[in-house]
Image (spheres, rainbow, N blue to C red):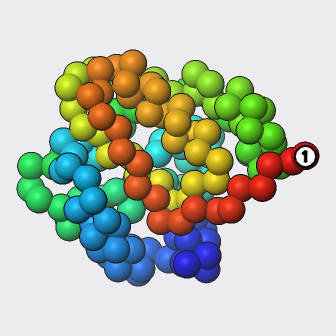
Amino acid sequence: MREMVLALKHGTGFAQLDWLAHRLAERCSAFAAPDLIIPMPLHASRLAERGFNQAAELARALRRHLPSPTKLALDLVVRDTDTPRLEGLRQKERLRAVRGAFRCRQPVTGLHVLVIDDVMTSGATLNELARTLKMSGAARVSNLVLARTLYQPKK
């Protein structure tokens, strides 16, 4: 899985998107069907550097495996803050680094929003995005990721 996620991150794993999305779609049966799917947004500078958002590509592929009423919103949320890489930061530092990083362009009142990302480490970024969505009216936010790293806090 590590190699597949890294290939996706570096733009060489797009051929695996359908297979990965199918695996994620199988996990969606564990919770109520979402009203809306959004990818973890990248800051504009990171998007320009990379040329694509791997979470958006994954969300597009996942949408094809879910029931028709589920909408995909690729630009509903903006990442206004170019947060530093969180690697090596303590949990409190991670939470502080992503605080206020996101902005919803329109309300999501009463909706169940499914956030798609490739990897979760501490959960700080996903938690902040969920907080932003709930402040914009989301009734429920579910997170679905390809992989979870083992987070080892500094002592």
Quadrant assignment, res 66: bottom left
x, y percent for residue 23: 34, 74
Residue at 61% x, 80% y is 3
The image shows a total of numbered marks equal to: 1
Query: Is residue 125 found left or right of 110 in the rendered image?
Result: right
x, y percent for residue 24: 34, 67
Q: Is residue 117 above or below residue 40?
A: below
Q: Secondary structure at mark 1?
A: loop
Residue closest to the far right: 155
Q: Is residue 80 above or below residue 125?
A: above
Compare residues 60 and 99 and report the one nearer the observer: 99
Residue 54 visible:
no
Kind of residue at disc 1: Lys
x, y percent for residue 21: 33, 69
Compare residues 121 and 116 and report the one nearer the observer: 121
Compare residues 6 and 95 and report the one nearer the observer: 95
Quadrant assignment, res 95: top right
x, y percent for residue 89: 81, 42
Residue at 80% x, 49% y is 153
Query: Is residue 123 found left or right of 61 in the rendered image?
Result: right
Q: Which residue is label 1 attached to?
A: 155
The N terminus: image quadrant: bottom right
Residue closest to the far left: 68
Query: Is residue 46 found left or right of 110 in the rendered image?
Result: right
Residue 75 visible:
yes
Residue at 34% x, 20% y is 136
| Dot 1 alpha-carbon crowd within 10 angstroms: few under 14, some 14 to 19, many 20 or more | few
